Image (cartoon, rainbow, N blue to C red):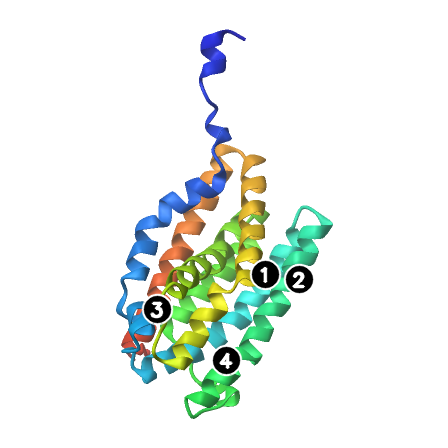
Amino acid sequence: MSKSESAVPSARQRPYSEELWDAIDPIYTAILGHPFITGLVDGSLPRDAFRHFVVQDSHYLRDYARALALCGAKAPTQDDVAAFAGDAVGAIAAEQEMHAEFMSALGGSAEQAARAPVAPTTRAYTSYLLATVYGGSFLDGLAAVLPCYWIYARVGEALLKESSPDPLYQRWIAAYGDESFQNVVRRVVALADRSGEEATPLQRGRALDHFVTTARYEWMFWNAAWHQETWPI
């Protein structure tokens, strides 16, 4: 190999996670500036908007757990299978525990949340998510579930630097800014790097499209809660 050849870095040397995050950085910036998120920090978020979020998140997490379980079934190593299985259990636990606590504080119950209608954005997001993990490759599914991990971790980390005057909102912020959750996300991001390194450019590009799509759904999910979205007909 000549000096000129060795001096040219391979495009594959760049971690896949950097390529993924660069593609959604404007979406993440829009999320941080959304009135739902800023309202969590300054305490101005209407409780009805937060209740809508909690109810829809309860619906979302049940399907997200299914998506994680299927990612585990397609995962490349035994450790990855076990990790996704644990994350699926964790998603259900979050729905049962944290959301029950929130609903109680909001004057409702987990049973009421379960009976509430699934809103349009929630239905669209979970339908896309499940279709991708069922019908696509492991990398496709991983890319589709990753924004929920990664964006929540980044949002939690950013908001934890401030303190909400509302104890309920501070509880939500602390859950996602917590170091144990950050460690889980680092593990999944590292798996995306490993899986992306082994993929072809076409496979990487297709997975990136899924990643960007579900990142957009993350913004839409908070926006739907802010507007307390219902079916128009």
Residue drawn where x is 35% and y is 74% of the image? 164
Q: Is residue 102 left or right of residue 24?
A: right
Residue drawn where x is 53% and y is 69% of the image? 63
Instruction: Give the x, y percent position of residue 225.
Output: 34, 74
Q: Estimate the spatial distance between the alpha carbons at disc 4 and disc 2, rounded to whole Å.
A: 21 Å
139 or 87, which lies in front?
Answer: 87
| Depicted 134 relative to depicted 8: above or below | below
Q: Estimate the spatial distance between the alpha carbons at disc 4 and disc 3, rounded to whole Å.
A: 16 Å
SS class, disc 4: helix
164 or 145, which lies in front?
Answer: 164
Which of the two labelled residues, at mark 4 and mark 2, occupies the earlier sequence position?
2
Spot the residue most to the bottom: 107
**Mark 2 crowdedness (10 Å alpha carbons): few <14, some 14-19, many ≥20:** many
- The residue to which callout 1 is attached is 68
Q: Number of numbered discs present?
A: 4
Instruction: Give the x, y percent position of residue 137.
Output: 57, 47
| Depicted 209 relative to depicted 2: above or below | below
- The residue to which callout 2 is attached is 85
| Depicted 130 relative to depicted 58: above or below | above
Mark 2 residue type: Ala
SS class, disc 3: helix
Q: Are marks 2 and 1 in contact (CB under 8 Å)?
A: yes
Which of the two labelled residues, at mark 3 and mark 2, occupies the earlier sequence position?
2
Which of the two labelled residues, at mark 4 and mark 3, occupies the earlier sequence position?
4
Q: Which mark is residue 151?
A: none
Q: Quadrant of the N terminus?
A: top right
Spot the residue most to the right: 78
226 or 201, which lies in front?
Answer: 226
